[in-house]
Image (cartoon, grey):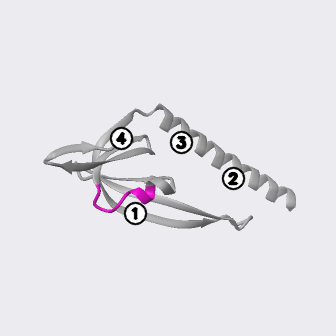
Amino acid sequence: MAFIICIAALIIMMFVFTKMLLSFSNNSSAAVESVAATVVEKKQGIYTHMQSEAHVPWFRVVFEMTDGSLMEFQMQQGDFRELEKGDRGMLTYQGNRYICYQKSKFKSEAREEEKC
């Protein structure tokens, strides 16, 4: 019985690894795109690893493009904290990988943007 459980666990790990490898490959081969977008939602939570009971925080932000479509990206805590709901600017991404977000600033009716 233990042998069957080990084989099943190995198959599941191979499936997860293959899925991660394919996602990485697809992202790497995708073009880097920059589009005007607005922050519409921020999400955060804690993932608890079942075996080690480690608590790992996650951070996601939903952006709305000018065409009305929505894109959600996972990001680091520092980037997450810098963004506020309603922020407008230029979103740069590759596939489903978040790269950066340049907030728009208005000074004397001239638009300036922060650099990523």
Secondary structure of the residue carrying tag 4 is loop
Above or below residue 13? Residue 35 is: above
Q: Earlier in the sequence, mark 1 or mark 4?
A: 1
74 left or right of 111? right
Quadrant in which the N terminus is drawn: bottom right
- What residue sits 44% from the left and 59% below the top? 81
Secondary structure of the residue carrying tag 1 is strand
* Residue on which the image places disc 4: 115
- Tell me if mark 4 has few (under 14), some (14-19) or many (20+) residues whose alpha carbon lies within 10 angstroms of its own: few
- Tell me if mark 3 has few (under 14), some (14-19) or many (20+) residues whose alpha carbon lies within 10 angstroms of its own: some
Callout 3 amino acid? Ser
68 left or right of 85? left
Label 2 to label 4: alpha-carbon separation: 42 Å
Label 2 to label 3: alpha-carbon separation: 17 Å
Q: Which of labels 1 and 2 is toward the front?
A: 1
* Residue on which the image places disc 2: 12
Callout 4 amino acid? Lys
x, y percent for residue 4? 82, 57
Callout 2 amino acid? Ile
Q: Main secondary structure of the magenta part?
A: loop
Q: Which of labels 2 and 4 is toward the front?
A: 4
**Front-lying residue, 27 or 15:** 27
Secondary structure of the residue carrying tag 3 is helix
49 left or right of 40? right
Q: Earlier in the sequence, mark 1 or mark 2?
A: 2
* Residue on which the image places disc 3: 23
* Residue on which the image places disc 1: 42
Q: Which residues are magenta?
A: 80-87
